[in-house]
Image (tube, rainbow, N blue to C red):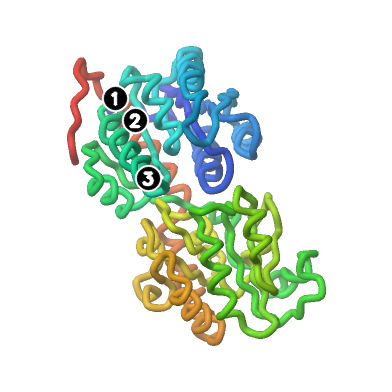
Amino acid sequence: MLQKSCTDEIRLTVLHLVQPVEGGVARVVTDLVAAQVRAGLRPVVACPPDGPLAAGASTAGARVCAWPAERAPGPGLGREILTAGRLIRACAPDLVHAHSAKAGLAGRLALRGRVPTVFQPHAWSFDALEGRAAGMATAWERFAARWSDRILCVSESERLAGQRAGITARWSVIHNGVDLGRFRPAREDTAASARASLPLLDGVPADAPLVVCVGRLSRQKGQDVLLRAWRTAAPPGARLVLVGEGPYGDELRRTAPDGVLFTGASADVRPWIHAADLLVLPSRWEGMALAPLEAMACGTPVLLTDVDGARESLPPGHLPHCLVPPEDPAALAAALTTLLGDPALRAELGRTAQHRTRSVFDVTKTSGAVLRLYEELVGQPRPTTRKRTER
């Protein structure tokens, strides 16, 4: 362990190597950077320059370096690894924190254990793949664990999924956290006017049921399953709003039934959360999704699929009402019908979700736990031979 904390005379330089640069990963990294600047660290973020992460991290106080990298491995992977290596040498960090599969791939190949390394999968890559590709991703994660001083999972279920896949590592579990100053219940007058402030809802009656899904329009987030459920579950006059943009956007817009609205990319999802009667996230896989935590912190009830992190997010009493199997439009439709037809149940679920989220998922607790992990790893002597150990 360090003899002084990071807030004293020792100032750690932490390099965050990141791809992707939008959505929950960008929010997690930006929140970590802001907390690390306040704690006296020197955070550096290496990421693709397009997308909201570079600007957000810079505003939060990090030094930002351009790391041109595609989201998935491809012909440019060798160049991306070399570039990552040059950035790491130029930055001379005390610790490297690689976020998501692509940065974990390039960063660990560039480092090979020479600098204390934290790998944070933000959901396992092999869950996103099928067949031979999934097998190759699993084999890589098993092999690369030797170059991870710690694999940091955002839920216990994500850690267990890694273990079931045969990954032998030193593990830490630190839940995602929410900025409770930004995501908080709306005052009555604010909640009442939230819909009126959203131009997309012009002409929609104030009492029309409103369901919101916040997330990248992608296979992972399962909006296609939600659209199939909506065809049978939508009450008369109800609206479903998909907040976000992504590679499935055109297909989802083409196949959407009546009553579905698309916002495109949104820099601030809070007005939609405050306006919603219910937030739905029908993901096919996750580590622990951030959007439901943000909604629950605002007192908005949620409906989730039973993927990694979902059960840990919800209060135990919510499981019968707010959790359905993934890729099951019929179960999702039945849960939507029940929740939209029972305002008293939604109000109670919102109150209990708010209490749990604000008690358990505070981003200051998350950032503090990550800081203690850094101190632990930097204070350890570097082994001459990398061995894989299991906690």
* Residue 229 visible at all: yes
Q: Are marks 1 and 3 in contact (CB under 8 Å)?
A: no
Residue pictured at 30% horizontal, 42% vertical: 172
Q: Quadrant of residue 93?
A: top left
Residue wearing tag 2: 375
Residue pictured at 67% horizontal, 74% vertical: 239
Q: Residues within 10 Å of mark 2 (few under 14, many from 20)?
A: some
* Residue 3 visible at all: no
Secondary-structure class at tag 3: loop
Q: Which amino acid type corresponds to the residue marked 3 in the rendered image?
A: Trp
Q: Are marks 1 and 2 in contact (CB under 8 Å)?
A: yes
Q: In this image, 167 relative to 206: left or right? A: left
Considering the image in quadrants, where does the N terminus appear? top left
Image mark for residue 124: 3
Residue pictured at 30% horizontal, 53% vertical: 156
Q: Residues within 10 Å of mark 1 (few under 14, many from 20)?
A: few
Residue wearing tag 1: 379
Secondary-structure class at tag 2: helix
Compute the Cα span from label 3 to label 2.
Answer: 26 Å
Compute the Cα span from label 1 to label 2.
Answer: 6 Å
The answer to which of marks 1 and 3 sits earlier in the sequence is 3
Q: Is residue 330 above or below residue 306?
A: below
Q: Which mark is in front, 1 or 3?
A: 3
Count how many numbered circles sit on residues in the image: 3
Residue 136, horizontal then vertical, whole percent: 33, 36
Residue 334, horizontal then vertical, whole percent: 47, 81
Q: Which mark is in front, 3 or 2?
A: 3
Q: Residues within 10 Å of mark 3 (few under 14, many from 20)?
A: many
Q: Which amino acid type corresponds to the residue marked 2 in the rendered image?
A: Glu
Considering the image in quadrants, where does the C terminus appear? top left
